[in-house]
């Protein structure tokens, strides 16, 4: 096993980041009903039913708005009471009766705007988005209504298109709104960025998302987590790793979640900044944030790459005992090698034996046999290498035969040793070494004979 194979870890990094960011939650469509309407000044309560939202800059355009008559106000208030009590059927009846009025009771444009505004609220509350949209469009069509009311209604229309996942129409409506809006908010830019994201127009999405993020920063405010998540995805999609890292570094200051530490670690790996790659992942680990199998195995790999095998072994050992890491043959192989590199041979051997037993191939048995040989456990070396060769799937059978020959030699089983060395010599990569061992063995046999004769 090549524990220094950072390439494999970096390939996994990209997959993880994409998986995490592809599941970005919609920023606009999850807005609550009351928030959607209150934020836009379209449902302000009975005491302010016919008033414009205060505190906003007055638009430059002036309009002569028709008056809201007392009797109309009272009937709208009646409908609104029904709405507040969620008696939508009764509210709709009142509103339809008003809509059907003719003659002197006919509603003027401003009264109709308030009427359709309440219609829209009822339909939205019932998740009837098409009817709510039509009602808001009727609000916006009315002549001589307050400009702020028209602008806010058009913004809500754009939001409803997003709720209905009609992204292109939502973008068009929002672009029209931008033309008349007074000082668009950061939320409006992020909504536009979200729309472009849904259409996979990542360049325009990035442009508008950046505007929103920078607007917040300029005011000393912390951009919302979802905004950062979208920004991170867009940079990554453009393969702009430095900007992806920069965004993640900002995110963990305000939103220090596990997934951001893990993703930051992977991005450092992309730039081959191994020290920071390890540091970011370790930060998540010491906070006990890493619980998944692949996260803990990656943590162990990073420790091995940094030549800290003892910590790598401890991570896997603890994870297996906590049942957070699956004790597969591959994972046990990593753990066994980590213990071995940490000079913890007694801990390494049983782990490697379990790994070999679980493996379909005989390669791990041959590696285990080599460990047994190094520790003068010659019979176990013979048994392990024999199992490995019998099971098959050994990358270098010649090496396995060499170890087997040396183990037999140390057990004074010279015939078996010679047979193993001859098998090893069939591979030109081991031929010279195998012949040297056979020559050494012949000399040793001869020396032993002379000693016996002299004795």
Image: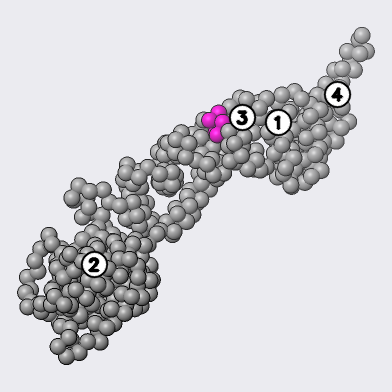
Which sits earlier in the primary sequence, circle 1 or circle 4? 1
User: Could you say which quadrant of the image residue 200 lies in?
Assistant: bottom left
Q: Is residue 399 visible?
A: no
Q: Earlier in the sequence, mark 2 or mark 3?
A: 2
Is label 2 in contact with label 3 (beta carbons under 8 Å)? no
Who is closer to the viewer here, 275 or 286? 286
- Pinpoint residue 220: horizontal percent, then vertical percent: 20, 47
Q: CA distance from mark 4 to mark 2?
A: 96 Å
Q: Which mark is residue 43?
A: 2
The range drawn in magenta is: 309-316
Dots 4, 3 in contact, CB < 8 A? no
Q: Which residue is mark 3?
A: 339
Horizontal side of residue 246 vs 304, given as left or right? left
Q: Where residue 191 sits in the image (x, y, percent)?
A: 29, 64
Q: Residues within 10 Å of mark 3 (few under 14, many from 20)?
A: many
Pointer 1: what residue?
350
Mark 2–mark 1 CB contact (< 8 Å): no
| Mark 4–mark 3 distance (CA, rounded to whole Å) | 31 Å
């Amino acid at each position: 096993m090549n524990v220094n194979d950072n390439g494999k870890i970096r390939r996994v990094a990209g997959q993880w980041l994409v998986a995490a960011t592809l599941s970005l939650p919609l920023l606009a469509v999850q807005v609550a009903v009351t928030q959607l309407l209150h934020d836009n000044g379209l449902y302000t309560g009975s005491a302010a039913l016919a008033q414009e939202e205060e505190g906003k800059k007055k638009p430059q355009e002036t309009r002569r708005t028709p008056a809201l008559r007392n009797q109309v106000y009272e009937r709208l208030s009646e409908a609104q009471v029904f709405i507040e009590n969620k008696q939508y059927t009764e509210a709709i009846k009142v509103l339809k009766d008003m809509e059907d009025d003719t003659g002197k009771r006919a509603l003027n444009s401003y009264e109709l705007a308030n009427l359709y505004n309440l219609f829209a609220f009822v339909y939205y509350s019932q998740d009837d988005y098409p009817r709510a949209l039509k009602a808001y469009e009727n609000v916006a069509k009315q002549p001589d209504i307050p400009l702020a009311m028209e602008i806010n209604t058009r913004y809500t229309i754009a939001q409803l298109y997003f709720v209905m996942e009609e992204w292109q129409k939502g973008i068009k409506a929002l672009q029209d709104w931008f033309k008349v809006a007074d000082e668009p908010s950061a939320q409006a830019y992020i909504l536009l960025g979200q729309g472009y994201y849904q259409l996979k127009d990542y360049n325009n999405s990035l442009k508008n998302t950046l505007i929103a993020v920078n607007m917040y920063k300029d005011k000393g405010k912390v951009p919302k987590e979802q905004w950062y998540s979208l920004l991170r995805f867009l940079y990554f999609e453009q393969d702009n790793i430095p900007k992806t890292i920069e965004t993640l570094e900002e995110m963990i200051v305000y939103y220090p979640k596990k997934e951001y530490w893990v993703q930051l670690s992977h991005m450092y790996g992309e730039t081959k900044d191994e020290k920071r790659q390890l540091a970011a992942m370790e930060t998540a680990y010491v906070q006990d944030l890493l619980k998944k199998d692949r996260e803990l195995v990656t943590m162990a790999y990073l420790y091995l790459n940094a030549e800290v095998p003892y910590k790598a072994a401890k991570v896997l050992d603890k994870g297996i005992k906590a049942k957070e890491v699956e004790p597969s043959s591959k994972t046990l192989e990593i753990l066994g090698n980590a213990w071995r590199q940490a000079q913890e041979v007694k801990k390494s051997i049983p782990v490697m034996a379990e790994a070999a037993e679980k493996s379909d191939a005989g390669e791990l048995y041959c590696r285990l046999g080599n460990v047994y040989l190094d520790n003068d456990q010659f019979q176990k070396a013979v048994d392990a290498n024999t199992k490995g060769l019998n099971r098959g799937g050994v990358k270098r059978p010649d090496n396995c035969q060499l170890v087997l020959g040396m183990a037999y030699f140390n057990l004074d089983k010279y015939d078996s040793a010679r047979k193993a060395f001859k098998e090893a010599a069939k591979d030109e990569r081991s031929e010279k070494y195998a012949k040297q061992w056979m020559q050494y063995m012949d000399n040793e046999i001869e020396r032993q004979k002379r000693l016996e004769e002299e004795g």
